[in-house]
Image (tube, rainbow, N blue to C red):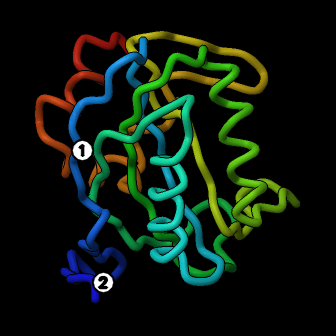
Amino acid sequence: MPLRRKLDEKHTIYVDHNFPKTLPQADGFRYHALLGVGGNIGDVKRRMNHLWIHLRRLSMLAPLKSGVILRNPPFGYTEQNDFENTVIEIVTSLEPKALLRLIWRIEKRFGRRRSFANAPRTLDLDILFFEKRFIRTKELSIPHPHWRERVSVTIPLGSLARKSARRYYENLDI
C-alpha cells in the first residue's frame, strides 16, 4: 500500500516500494539521463512498478534512481483523468536518438497509443536530460523545453538526492 501525502487540492505525492528508490551505480555505461514517466489510463502506479522491473532487465540501460510519484491535473487537453508522474535516472551507452527509439518501443509494449497531442495515455516516457547536452530536432528536444514549468517534473526531480538532481540542470543556460 503506497503512502500518500496531499500537497493541495490538485496535487498528491505517493511513495511506493520502487518510488523513490536508489540502486547501486551500474558499471559499463557511458551516459546519465533523466526520464520523465507519466500516464493516466488504468493502474498507472502498478504500471510504473512494472516499468521499473522492465528497465532493470534491459541490457542497454540501467535505472539508478526514481523519484516520488505525483498525481496532478492534466494540461493542454483537460477533459481527461489526472496524471501520475515521476522521474527515473538511468545510465546507458545509447546515444540520445537511439534511447528515444528504445523508449518509444517501451511505451508501445506498455500499451501506448498515439492519437492526438496531450491525449490520455497508459505510459508516457520523455528524455528530460541527457548529460548536459542540448539537442533540438523535430523529434527530440533535450533538455525538455518545459521542464521548469511543470510540477510533474520539478516535484519528482526534487525528491531525488540533491546532488543527483543538480547533475542535470546546474549550469544550464536556458
Residue 77: x and y, percent? Answer: 70, 66
Which SS class for mark 1?
loop
Mark seen at residue 82: none
* The C terminus - image quarter: top left
C-alpha gap between disc 1 and disc 2: 33 Å
Return the residue found at the far right: 115
Q: Which amino acid, by three-letter code, is at mark 1? A: Leu
In the orientation shown, which residue stands out farthest toward the bottom?
1
Viewer-nearest residue: 71 or 27 = 27
Q: Residue at x 58, y 66 (%)?
A: 39
35 over 11 or under it: above or below: above
Element type at mark 2: loop
Choose between 154 and 24: the one closer to the eye: 24
Kindly identify which residue carries mark 1. 23
| Quadrant in the picture for the N terminus | bottom left
Q: Is residue 26 visible?
A: yes
* Residue 161 image-quadrant placement: top left
Say left or right for 150 vs 109. Answer: left
Residue appearing at x 29%, y 23% in the figure: 169
Q: Which is nearer the eye, 106 or 154?
A: 106
Residue that label 2 marks: 9
The crowding category of the residue bearing disc 2, from other C-alpha atoms within 10 Å (few below 14, some 14 to 19, many at least 20), is few
